[in-house]
Image (cartoon, rainbow, N blue to C red):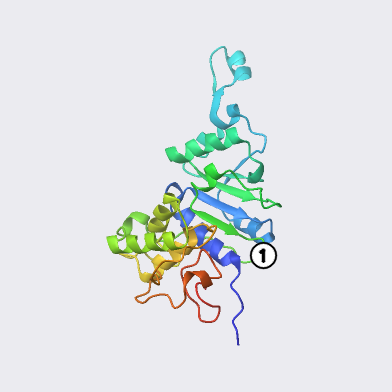
Amino acid sequence: MTPAPADPLDDAVLAARLFVLAPSTFKGMVLRGSSPAREALVAALPLRRLPGDVDDERLLGGIDLAASLSAGRPVRQTGLIEEARGGALIAGMAERMDAGVAGRLAQALDEGGTALLLLDDAAEPEEAPPASLTERLAFLCDLSASRRWQGVELAPAAGRLADVAPLAENDLRALAATAEALGVENLRALIFAGEAARKPPRMPRPRQKPSRRDKSTASWSTYPPAPAPRVPRSPPLWVGASSPCPAPMRECSSRRSTRCNPQRGPHERA
């Protein structure tokens, strides 16, 4: 009997647990597709909402003229980025975000002051959140096909990311080879994968070094969909395995997964 396909919400919850564990490391998430599953996941995250019509004064802060005139001295108003320091901002309808606001948020992400969650409600293929932001965020989850919304819980993970040793050079090379085979050219995605492998969300307690399953989870959870997989001259090693993948990359039905499932076909997400 063929098992039922996994719901996209499962992957999104795993990504969210990693994000909550280290928001300054993973920078944020993109949640695509309006659905009850997305609403349930957003409700489980500690977030500060970013208005769609926000201006620079509210975003960055500045002198509050009304309060300054009343007090007879300059009174500074804090901006949303500063208020969310150490946490995360959530931006709805991110596909319509103003380029200037996106630039301010990208600078804040680079400075490490805050993290960001983008809600992507694009209806047309050419619509998308600003690339200047999406390439800076570790996780992209499409929940438009999810049929679940109950039981979304983000229990705090035990330990810290620093409790797990960085990946060995061979492990980093394996992640890099996977990224190249999948056509992923964003170096940040490779860095995110290396960090995600150090603390998988299923671990009740931190390990001293990542396992093979950790590295596989890290690759599919952080590598974005690529335009077209590249066919290497020789069959690549799939992350977490000691033998070549049983099928060439051109037969892959999933561009993000690096795991093979005999029930679903080569490279299809488990």
Residue 201 makes an appearance in the image: no
Report x, y in % for residue 147: 67, 68
User: Which structural element holds mark 1?
Assistant: loop
Residue 250 as seen in the image, left or right of residue 187: right
Which residue appears at 56% of the width and 67% of the height? 10
Furthest-right residue in this view: 123
The local crowd at label 1, few if under 14, some if 14 to 19, many if 20 or more residues have their Cα within 10 Å, is: some
Q: Nearer the viewer, residue 243 or 32?
A: 243
Residue 177 as seen in the image, left or right of residue 225: left
Q: Is residue 267 above or below residue 120?
A: below
Furthest-top residue in this view: 72
**Quarter of the image that includes the N terminus:** bottom right
Q: Quadrant of residue 94?
A: top right
Residue 16 makes an appearance in the image: yes
Report x, y in % for residue 209: 31, 64
Which residue lies under the disc numbered 1? 145
Q: How many marks?
A: 1
Q: Is residue 114 above or below residue 237?
A: above
**What's under tag 1, amino acid-wise?**
Ala
